[in-house]
Image (spheres, helix red, strand yellow):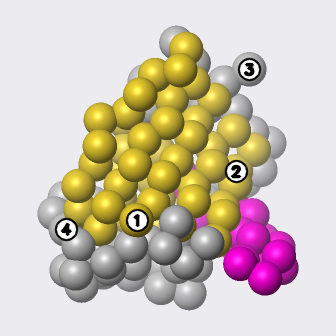
Amino acid sequence: MAANVTGYVHTQPTPQTTESIQGRVVYDATAIVATDYTELPLGFEPDVFEWHNLTDLTYFKWIRGMADGTALKTAANGTTTLIAAPNGFSFPGNRSVRVSQNATTAAIAASKVTAYKAAAN
């Protein structure tokens, strides 16, 4: 996998506290490479990470204790599924998160607006 370093605008995160942050990522019409990821700096290791695809109304969540690279996905119709590694969220140990661009997972896609929130207890 490689980092997606173009094709999106990351709005500077708004710290809620020293261990809570939220931000927004808007993807342009550039083709998304399914084997790549978007890496976002958080500034801490989260206990909970949430990702919202605001365009398609899908919601993703990772909670400490889940395997690295996994996530829970809730579709617009309310169906919840477990996303298997490595197609969810990874935490490489540098106080950031990597969001998989896997096409089946569909957390990231061209021309989509997303928002995220991370928190540590």
- Specify start and end residues of the magenta stretch as a single range: 71-90
Q: Verify whether residue 54 appears in magenta.
A: no
Mark closer to the observer (1, 3):
1
Q: Amino acid at mark 3?
A: Asn
Label annotation for residue 113: 1
Instruction: Give the structural element (helix, strand or loop) at label 4.
Output: loop
Q: Residues within 10 Å of mark 1 (few under 14, many from 20)?
A: many
Instruction: Give the structural element (helix, strand or loop) at label 1.
Output: strand
As drawn, is 13 to the left or to the right of 60? left
Instruction: Give the structural element (helix, strand or loop) at label 2.
Output: strand
Q: Amino acid at mark 2?
A: Trp
Q: Amino acid at mark 1?
A: Val
Residue bearing the label numbered 3: 121
Give the mark nearer the N terminus: 3 vs 4: 4
**Which residue occupies 39% across, 78% down?**
109
Give the mark nearer the N terminus: 1 vs 3: 1
Residue bearing the label numbered 4: 7
Q: CA distance from mark 1 to mark 3?
A: 27 Å
Q: Is residue 107 visible?
A: yes
Q: How far across and how far down the image is residue 98, in percent? A: 44, 52
**Which residue occupies 58% across, 36% down?**
118
Give the mark nearer the N terminus: 4 vs 2: 4
